[in-house]
């Protein structure tokens, strides 16, 4: 009878690392989606403002400035919100009690 050796897969899977990677990938996709949506909205508004015939040059410039400021605000909101969410989820996954307490305070 032949001698058969079974070789097991020696690759260890760290569930926490894979979970964190999955969550961060999802959050990166969501952040990119929000940025591109904001950019498309900014570009559309800028085009409408530039093509407007019933506005003076000063009104157009003011409207373009407001549009640009709004776009920047949306980008920074996305960065802050997803940054906080990422840190919160990673903190919860890592099991840090102080982070969990801070999240509870924010939610309450």
Image: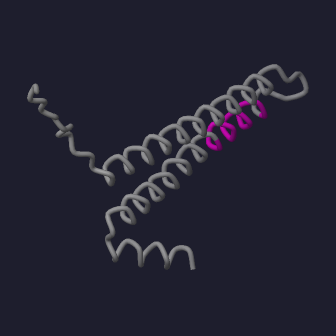
Q: Is residue 106 left or right of residue 53?
A: left
Range of magenta residues: 59-70
Q: How many marks?
A: 0
Q: Verify whether residue 67 appears in magenta.
A: yes
Q: Verify whether residue 24 appears in magenta.
A: no
Q: Position of residue 25 (x, y in %)?
A: 44, 40
Q: How has the structure been colored for display?
A: one colour
Q: Is residue 94 above or below residue 6?
A: below
Q: Is residue 94 above or below residue 40?
A: below
Residue at image x 71%, y 32%?
41
Name the image quarter holding residue 67: top right
State the residue in front, 47 or 29. Answer: 29
Residue at image x 57%, y 36%?
35
The quarter of the picture where the N terminus appears is: top left
Q: Is residue 86 above or below residue 8?
A: below
Q: Position of residue 54 (x, y in %)?
A: 91, 27
Q: Is residue 51 left or right of residue 19?
A: right
Dominant secondary structure (helix, strand or loop) of the stretch shown in magenta:
helix
State the residue in front, 49 or 79. Answer: 79
Q: Position of residue 69 (x, y in %)?
A: 62, 42
């Amino acid at each position: 009878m032949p001698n058969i050796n079974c070789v097991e897969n020696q690759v260890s899977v760290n569930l926490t690392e894979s979970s964190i990677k999955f969550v961060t990938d999802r959050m990166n996709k969501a952040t990119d989606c929000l940025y591109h949506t904001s950019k498309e909205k900014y570009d559309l508004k800028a085009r409408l403002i530039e093509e407007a015939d019933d506005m003076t040059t000063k009104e157009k410039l003011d409207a373009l400035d407001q549009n640009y400021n709004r776009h920047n605000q949306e980008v920074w909101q996305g960065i802050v919100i997803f940054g906080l969410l990422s840190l919160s989820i990673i903190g919860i996954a890592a099991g840090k009690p102080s982070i969990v307490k801070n999240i509870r305070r924010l939610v309450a």
